[in-house]
Image (tube, helix red, strand yellow):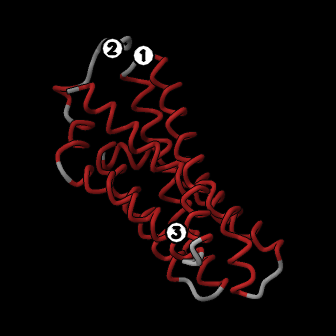
Amino acid sequence: MMTLLLAIIYLTFISLGLPDSLLGSAWPGIYQDFSVPISYAGTVSMIIAAGTVLSSLESDRLIKWLGVGKVTLFSVAMTMAALFGFSMSRSFSVLCLWAIPYGLGAGSIDAALNNYVALHFASRHMSWLHCMWGVGASIGPVLMGWAMTRQLGWTAGYRSVALIQAVPCRTCSHRAFSLLSASAYISDDPHA
């Protein structure tokens, strides 16, 4: 069971990395569509970063209140909704509003799963966890580039990543992340 759980956590970290590098690859289309300066990308990035920091700082309280499984489920769902919101945005201000739940969701997932893996698995799994984030961060711009070169636009790129986010969200909504909260499956051996 712990191997299945670890595989699901790795999958979740791939999906966590996917949107992290989208803004830079999508911005050439976004700033033209919204008629804003190129520098406004920094505003969106800072809103996302602020949400990530805030939710990371509050993740301990959230985990104690809801448990790792529910925090992960809600965070993935929030990130997925924010990515759909990005894809539906028709103005810069709306894009900034959707950046708030995106940052909050991303920070909570990151902190909750990092903590869980650090406490319940050998340290090598933490390295693999961040490797999986890198895989996602590498694939994200490829998906955006695919959408933009086929004249589908940046909105289709964000929408495709949101749909991919639905995979861990669906996995979370089923039994898999209940394992995160079930003490019967928690390994006492940190070298597992």
Left/right of residue 183 with respect to residue 27 in the rendered view: left
- Relative to 67, say whether 30 is above or below: below
Q: Position of residue 111 (x, y in %)?
A: 49, 41
Look at label 2 and name its amino acid: Ala
- Relative to 94, say whether 174 is above or below: above
- Residue under the image location 52 percent in, 69 percent down: 158
Could you tell me if the residues under marks 2 and 1 are in contact, i.e. CB atoms within 8 Å? yes
Look at label 3 and name its amino acid: Tyr
Circle 2 or circle 3, nearest the eye? 3
Question: Element type at marker 3?
Answer: helix
Please tell me which of labels 2 and 3 falls first in the chain: 3
The residue lying toward the viewer, choosing from 105 and 85, is: 85
Question: Element type at marker 1?
Answer: loop
Please tell me which of labels 3 and 1 falls first in the chain: 1
Could you tell me if the residues under marks 2 and 3 are in contact, i.e. CB atoms within 8 Å? no
The quadrant of the image that shows the N terminus is top left
Mark 2 → mark 1, Cα distance in angstroms: 6 Å
Residue at image mark 2: 192
The residue lying toward the viewer, choosing from 121 and 161, is: 161
Q: Position of residue 183 (x, y in %)?
A: 20, 29
Q: Picture quarter containing residue 145?
A: bottom right
Mark 3 → mark 1, Cα distance in angstroms: 34 Å
The quadrant of the image that shows the C terminus is top left
The numbered mark at residue 122 is: 1
The residue lying toward the viewer, choosing from 185 and 148, is: 148
Q: Position of residue 15 (x, y in %)?
A: 45, 50
Circle 3 or circle 1, nearest the eye? 3
Residue at image mark 3: 158
- Residue under the image location 26 percent in, 43 percent down: 177
